[in-house]
Image: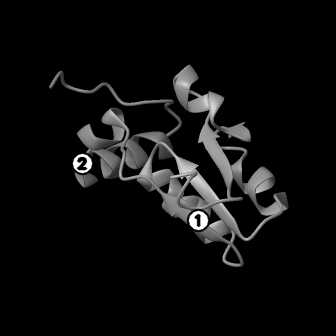
Amino acid sequence: MRARYLGALVVTYVKTKEAGKAASHIFRTSANAAHIVPAMEGDTLIKTPDKDLAQNVARMVPHQRVMRREGSCIVHERCTAQDLREFRAFSAIGCSSPTRNAR
């Protein structure tokens, strides 16, 4: 992707393997993206490795183009909308995480 978008800054999720980090300008967590990404200069960013996190980043920086790989997080791929609703309901009563059935 870097060859396709010359000069683009590469933003990588912090838990990415070393090979991905070696090609990156900055690493970030999901939590700190809201502070780091908008402050980055440049009109094009490449967000790796997760397309879903890239979509979230793109919403934070409408003035920049955010290019993404079609990769995904295996944990997020396993979660359903119902899982999320149950987690939110469980969290609302003060618990840190629900007990999930093994899949």
Q: Could you tell me which residue is drawn at 68 percent across and 58 percent down?
A: 8
In the figure, residue 15 lies in which quadrant? Answer: top right
Local SS, label 1: strand
The residue positioned 27% from the left and 54% from the top of the image is: 81
> Residue 33 shows which numbered tag?
none
The relative height of residue 70 versus residue 17 in the rendered view (above or below) is: below
- How packed mark 2 is, by other alpha carbons closer than 10 Å (few <14, some 14-19, many 20 or more), is few
Residue type at numbered disc 2:
Thr
User: Where is residue 21 drawn, in percent x and y?
Assistant: 62, 30
Task: Please name the amino acid that badge 1 sits on.
Answer: Val
Give the answer, above or below, for where 102 lies relative to 33.
Answer: above
Q: Which residue is mark 2?
A: 80
Q: Quadrant of residue 63?
A: bottom right
Q: Percent x, y for residue 48?
A: 52, 45
Disc 1 crowd rating (10 Å Cα; few below 14, some 14-19, many 20+) is many
In this rendering, position of residue 81 left or right of residue 13 = left
**Nearer-N-terminus badge (2/1):** 1
Residue 103, given in percent of the width and then of the height, sits at: 14, 26
In the picture, the disc for residue 66 is 1
Residue contact at pointers 2 and 1, CB within 8 angstroms? no
Q: Nearer the viewer, residue 68 or 95?
A: 68
The residues bearing labels 2 and 1 have C-alpha atoms spaced at a distance of 26 Å
x then y, percent, for residue 101: 19, 25
Residue 99 vs residue 41, the one in the foreground: 41
Observer-side mark, 2 or 1, equals 1
Write the residue at 31% across / 25% down: 99
User: In the depicted view, which residue is nearer to us: 20 or 3?
Assistant: 3
